[in-house]
Structure formats: C-alpha cells, structure tokens
Image (spheres, rainbow, N blue to C red):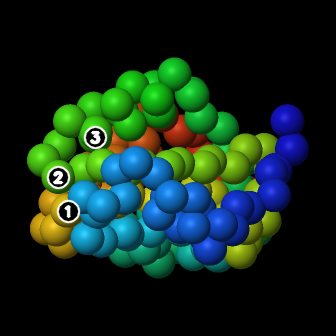
C-alpha cells in the first residue's frame, strides 16, 4: 500500500470541538511525527558513523493501535483521541503520524500523549530506514 494524504489539523480540531465531550476539554495537544534525514541511531544513541536517511518503509498493526487508544481513554481527564498513521515508502519530510488528544488539564494531556505515542512507536509500528 502507498503513502496516504496527510490530514488537516484545523479540520480535526473543528471536529473535536463539536463532539459531546468538548465542554470537558481545556486543552488539545497534537503530535506530528515526520521522516527525518538523520538516522535513529545517530539522534538517539549518538552513532556518528550512520548514513543519511533518504526515506522510510513504514507499516503498523491497526488492532494494536485501537487497543492502545482504548487504554489511553482510561487515563484521568482524557476525553478525545484521534490518530492517523501513514504507510508505505515515505520520503524525508513526509508525515509519519498525527495524534490529537483532548483532556481537562495540561498535565493529563501531556502524560496521555507521551503514553500513546510511545506505545504506538514501540508496539505497533515497523519502521525501516532507507539510505
């Protein structure tokens, strides 16, 4: 399957603010993961001998993503979640992931975003850097 067209965050926020949960929400937080030129080994572990990344092969398991979203809704103060993941062969600068989380207060929303994105990245996706 080929890469997808990225969503509009303005459209997502407008939709979120029309949901029944909107009056409970005091903050929305977004995450936009993008394919970068620096290899993961370089930015995470300081490996200086890496080649520049030209792109990425990306896939994910939707059932696992859905399960983790459901778990994130159980966190205190979280009332809205929307996730979009790309797929296929991506180029540097292409969007990998968008996440929108709405909740009552900043600490709850920040914690939920960290939790959700971390679990998706660690448990649901396969990323192969292309040099």
- Tag 1 or tag 3, which sits nearer the N-term? 3
Mark 2 → mark 3, Cα distance in angstroms: 10 Å
Foreground label between 2 and 3 = 2
Q: Nearer the viewer, residue 107 or 122?
A: 107
Other-residue count near label 3 (Cα within 10 Å), few / some / many at <14 / 14–19 / ≥20: many
Q: Nearer the viewer, residue 128 or 12?
A: 12
Judge whether residue 76 can be spotted in this image. yes
Query: Is 61 above or below relative to 78?
Result: above
Give SS at disc 2: loop
Residue name at image x 27 percent, y 32 percent = 71
Other-residue count near label 1 (Cα within 10 Å), few / some / many at <14 / 14–19 / ≥20: some
- Tag 1 or tag 2, which sits nearer the N-term? 2
Residue name at image x 70 percent, y 55 percent = 56
Q: Residue furthest right?
A: 2
Residue under label 1, please give it: 104
Residue 107 pos. (x, y %) = 13, 67
Judge whether residue 53 can be spotted in this image. no
Q: Quadrant of the C terminus?
A: bottom right
Left or right of residue 110: residue 116:
right
Residue under label 3, please give it: 72
Residue 22 pos. (x, y %) = 37, 58
Residue under label 2, please give it: 77
Res. 8 image quadrant: bottom right
Residue name at image x 57 percent, y 27 percent = 61
Give SS at disc 1: loop
Query: Is 56 above or below relative to 105?
Result: above
Mark 2 → mark 1, Cα distance in angstroms: 5 Å
Q: Are marks 2 and 1 in contact (CB under 8 Å)?
A: yes
Query: Is 3 above or below relative to 42?
Result: above
């Amino acid at each position: 399957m080929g890469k997808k067209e990225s969503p509009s965050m303005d459209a997502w926020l407008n939709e979120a603010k029309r949901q029944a949960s909107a009056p409970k929400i005091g903050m929305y937080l977004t995450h936009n993961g993008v394919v970068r030129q620096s290899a993961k080994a370089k930015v995470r572990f300081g490996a200086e001998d890496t080649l520049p990344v030209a792109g990425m092969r990306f896939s994910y398991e939707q059932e696992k993503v859905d399960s983790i979203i459901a778990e994130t809704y159980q966190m205190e103060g979280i009332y809205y979640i929307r996730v979009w993941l790309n797929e296929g062969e991506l180029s540097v600068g292409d969007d990998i992931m968008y996440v929108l989380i709405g909740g009552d207060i900043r600490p709850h929303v920040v914690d939920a975003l960290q939790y959700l994105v971390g679990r998706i990245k660690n448990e649901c996706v396969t990323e192969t850097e292309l040099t």
